[in-house]
Amino acid sequence: EQLKGAVTFEHVSFRYPGMSSYVLKDISFHVRPGETVAILGSTGAGKSSILQLIPRLYDPTEGAVYVDGMNLKDIKMDDLRKRIGFTPQESILFSGTVEENLAWGKSDASLSEMKAAAKDAQIHETITDLKDGYETKLGQKGINLSGGQKQRLSVARALIRKPNILILDDSTSALDLQTESKVLDAIDEYKCTLFIVTQKLSTAKRADKIMLIDDGKIIEEGTHDQLMNTSALYREIAYS
Ligand code: TTP
């Protein structure tokens, strides 16, 4: 499947159900299989809203979204879940064991698959240091883990599925530069399309495409080098 990993937005406008104002306004873009897209923009700009439309947490109010070359509406939800790994801004962990948390949504995952994903997400050693390793019970919402540990666990959970498309909505914000870079190096090996919301210049630099979002619109699009040349706004972000 040649378009495996492709994502297209076609004139997408969106307002949350019951709300009168649009949070996304005529968004169009095309991402090729395997590309890394960094999404930047100030708080409330619409970054999460864009990303939530890809796993179909919401449907666009107008326009259409295509994944792997197909209109989302023509993909069965079960099938879509297999194609997309999504880690929301707030990690969703529950009070089961580490293993149960990792396998959530993919109950047939083997321990070795979990370990491989945990290593890639740079969380394996933290897990083996816990009292009962992978069988350690996490407190409610993973209360006994730090923010960055929760994020890495969520990334590991998404990687277990070996998704065509991986969406990290601010899911590496609590990681230091070096750890984040290791995680991203490992993700490169999955050859998946990656959407990553970030504030880190080092992450934006490695992207094939940077999208600068403001007030529900893509206001700039390009590589780091391109935007450094053409966008005063991007330079402002880069130098801040
Ligand atoms: P977001 O899409 O959450 O904007 P963002 O992801 O760029 O912001 P942040 O960096 O802070 O995460 O919000 C865009 C607008 O949509 C904002 O006005 C809030 C609104 N919104 C809702 O009404 N309901 C929702 O569930 C979300 C996520 C956003």
Image (cartoon, helix red, strand yellow):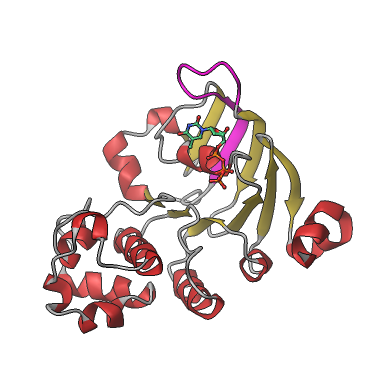
On screen, residue 66 versus residue 207, left or right, reads left
On screen, residue 120 versus residue 194, left or right, reads left
Name which quarter of the figure residue 230 lies in. bottom right
Seen at 44% across and 55% down, the residue is 166
Rendered view: 45 above or below 183: above
Q: Nearer the viewer, residue 148 or 160?
A: 148
Residue 231 can be seen in this image = no
In the rendered image, residue 102, in percent from the top left (x then y), is placed at 23, 62
In the rendered image, residue 4, in percent from the top left (x then y), is placed at 46, 51
Q: Nearer the viewer, residue 137 or 16?
A: 137
Rendered view: 140 above or below 130: above
Magenta residues span 7-22
On screen, residue 22 versus residue 239, left or right, reads left
Rendered view: 153 above or below 13: below
Seen at 45% across and 69% down, the residue is 187
Q: How many numbered discs?
A: 0
Quarter of the image where the C terminus is located: bottom right
Residue 92 can be seen in this image = yes
Is residue 208 one of those drawn in magenta? no
